Amino acid sequence: MSAAPILAAFRQAFAEAWAGGAGALLPLGFLGGAAVLVPLGIGSDTQTLKAVGPGIIWVSLALSSLVTLERIFQADVEDGTLDLWLQTGAPMAALAAAKTLAHWLAAGLPLALASPLLALMFQAQASVELLIHLGLYTLGGLAFFFWGGVGAALSATVRRGGLLISIIALPLYVPTAIFGAIAMTGGIGSDGAPLLLAASTLFACAVAPYAMAAALRLAAD
Amino acid sequence: MTISTAPLIHATGLAIMRGERVLFRGVGLTLSPSDAIVLRGANGAGKTTLLRMLAGLTRPEAGELARAAPHHWIGHKEGIKPQETPRSHLALWAQAWGSTADIPEILEKMALTRAADVPGRYLSAGQRRRTAFGRLLLEHRPIWLLDEPYTALDAGGRAMLDGFISSHLVANGALITSMHDAAGFPVTHEVTL
């Protein structure tokens, strides 16, 4: 088996994410908008903002990663591309993982990269800690995209499946959100939390592709 | 050159349910090299479903299905992304399939030279069909499964497709297609659903 179909799927998905007017930037706008609204809502008290900042960014990151996921498999069902990918002979789980990774690179990674800017808005000190947080957001965001991809695959044949994706994916976001938040707040267990976050992301990357593949095969049936 | 006469596809007793309804049952067919089988049947009889089954996309409810060679599939949906041009579409699938076919030559054969760099969202239905049929020429595969291939093609497009199919059959290829019109190539037998 060659890796050619998997690379081609990655290439197509990456091009698709950027096609149609920089759709990949949409989640970034959503993240920015959501995070900016919070200080307006809870007031400008420095200590409060400092305390809630990391958590608010986690929640905004989780929600904004859902923004573009609706189309990643639904478009393939509608235009017939899914039928072609299913017939390449390559493992569908690998193809689904390649597509999810492409969408994460186009739409998910920019979210994590924007997190230090948002953290500054929440009165965080500009320090190396922000870069560590960036790494944690990157790890967590990857898990969000893989779990969201499962929701996207399951709702690929559902019109306006965006809400369904949220309902399927949000519970799966829980471990990431918990370990991510603990790692940043520095409370009990915060030493091991980054490792647990990484483990839960690894678990997502390992399990979600098989769930996506099964859902997509059903969608084509 | 040895000519194999072992069947490329052998299917017996295929049945499929759609919801609570049995769409068809007891359908069998054997496709040998150089065969062209045309599926006939009214709208909704299950021609597309049978073709998807033969392509391995839909699982039959009952029956046996064996496919002995790789196949090309062209369905109603062409599989062209809005941002893909005929050229980039064929290049992508050439990459995916590991084909080294000459893409400009295929575009010329498909009379797509002028539309070669037009994004999918601006292509006409006929141009989309021609692009999809271009995939048939990327790689030689013995079995072609075509779902109503004449749809949206003009007279020139049909003649072109008939030509491709005829030479595919001569080269020991085989074809199963659904259509409502008379076929422009030698038909071995018809299956009515």
Image (spheres, rainbow, N blue to C red):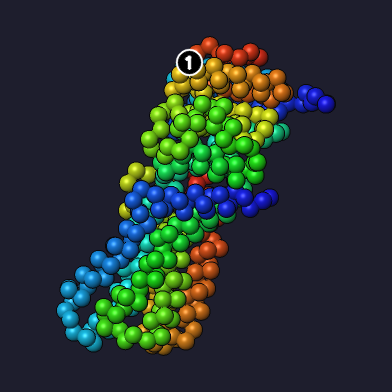
**Going by the image, does A45 lie left or right of A137?**
left
Which residue of the protein is positioned furthest toward the right in this rendering? B2
**Going by the image, does A124 lie left or right of B152?**
left
**Going by the image, does B13 lie left or right of B119?**
right
Identify the image quadrant of residue B119: top left
* Residue B60 visible within the image: no
* Residue A194 image offset from top left, x and y in percent: 47, 80
* Residue A133 image offset from top left, x and y in percent: 40, 79
Position of A79 relative to A65 (above/below): above
Position of B70 relative to A149 (above/below): above
Q: Please name the residue shown 72% across and 23% down the image.
A: B172
* Residue A109 image offset from top left, x and y in percent: 42, 66
| Residue with the mark numbered 1 | B155
* Residue A15 visible within the image: yes
Q: Please name the residue shown 30% across and 66% down the image.
A: A31
Identify the image quadrant of residue A84: top right
| Foreground pick, A178 / B186 | B186
Question: What amino acid is found at the position of numbered circle 1 in the picture?
Answer: Ala
* Residue A98 image offset from top left, x and y in percent: 53, 56
Q: Please name the residue shown 65% across and 29% down the image.
A: B143
